[in-house]
Amino acid sequence: MHVDLNADMGESFGPWNMGDDAALLETVTSANIACGAHAGDPDVMATTMGIALEKGVGVGSHPGLPDLQGFGRRRIQMPLASLQNSIRCQVGATLGMAAALGANVRHIKLHGALGNMTSEDEEMARACYEAALSAHPDSILVVLAATAQERAARSLGARFACEIFADRAYNDDATLVDRRLPGAVIHDADLAGKRMVEMVKAQAIITDSGKRIETPIDTICCHGDTPEAVEIAASVRRTLEAEGIAVKTFEGRTGSSGTGVSLTR
C-alpha cells in the first residue's frame, strides 16, 4: 500500500512570508505551487519550484480565485468564462516557469474557496477542469475525493488523483467542515497522523459524525500556511511509514464512473 503526501506552498508574496516551504519539501512528495492569483509572485514561484526540483518532489499548479487580500478563501462569484480564463493564465504561468527551470508540471489542484465551491458544484468543477486541461492536457487533476470534483474529472475522462486532508474535518457529504466552525482545522500533529493511517487503511473518509465514505485515496494534503504545517506533515509521513504504508508520488487514475483504475497498480 502506498500514498502521496502533498502540500500547498509558494504562497509568500514580496517581503511577506507564508509558511516554511523549504522544510515542507523535505517531507512531502508533491508540491502545489501558487500561481499569483490568490498568493505567490514570480520570485516565490521560481524559488519554491527550484527547491522542489532539487528534492525530487512532484510539481503542481495551484490556481485559485483572484483574491490576494483574502488569500483565495473568500467565495467570489465570477462568470464561468472569466474564471476559466483566470485558470488558464495561472496554469500557463506555472508551465512557463517550469519550462525555464527544467521542471515538469505533473498535476493541477484548485485552491481554497475555489476548491470548496467546486467540491459542491459539478458544473463549476467541470468548467474549471476543462480550462485547466486546455492549458495543460497531460496534467493529473487532484480532486477532493468523493465530491463533485471527482465526478467532474470522471465525466471528462481525465486522469485524476483522489485527495484527503490531514488537517481538516469532514462533513457527511465528504466536503470539508467550514473553517469558521470549531474543530474544522486540526492542529494536533499526532492526531493528524493517526487519522490518516486509519483512513488510508480503510480506503475511506471518516467524517466528524463517524460516517465512513469509501473512496480510493491517492494523496494526502497538509496545508502549508498553518503554524503546525511542518510538524503535521512530518507526523503524517512518520506514522504512515511506521504502519508499512509507503509514501511516494502518485501516478493518477482513470475511470468514468464507480471505482477508478489506478495507473500505479
Image (cartoon, grey):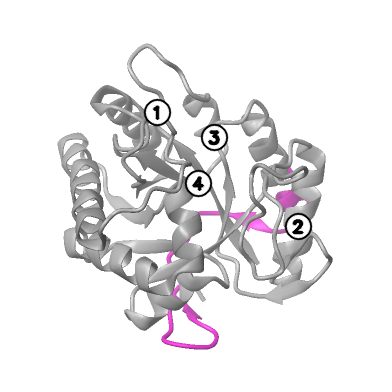
Name the residue tied to disc 1: 69
Along the line of sight, which residue is nearer the eye, 250 or 39? 39
Q: Position of residue 103 (x, y in %)?
A: 26, 43
Element marked by disc 1: loop
Q: Residue at x 69, y 42 (%)?
A: 185
Circles 1 and 2, Cβ within 8 Å, touching? The answer is no
Q: Residue at x 69, y 37 (%)?
A: 232
Identify the mark nearer the N-term, 1 or 4.
Answer: 4
Circles 1 and 3, Cβ within 8 Å, touching? The answer is no
The three-letter code of the residue at mark 3 reads Gly
The three-letter code of the residue at mark 2 reads Val
Identify the mark nearer the N-term, 3 or 2.
Answer: 2
Identify the mark nearer the N-term, 1 or 3.
Answer: 1
Circles 2 and 4, Cβ within 8 Å, touching? The answer is no
Neighbour tally class for label 4: few under 14, some 14-19, many 20 plus, Cα within 10 Å: many
User: Disc 1 versus disc 4: distance between alpha carbons?
Assistant: 29 Å
**Quarter location, residue 157:** bottom left
**Mark number for residue 224?**
3
The three-letter code of the residue at mark 4 reads Thr
Identify the mark nearer the N-term, 3 or 4.
Answer: 4
Name the residue tied to disc 4: 29
Along the line of sight, which residue is nearer the eye, 185 or 255? 185
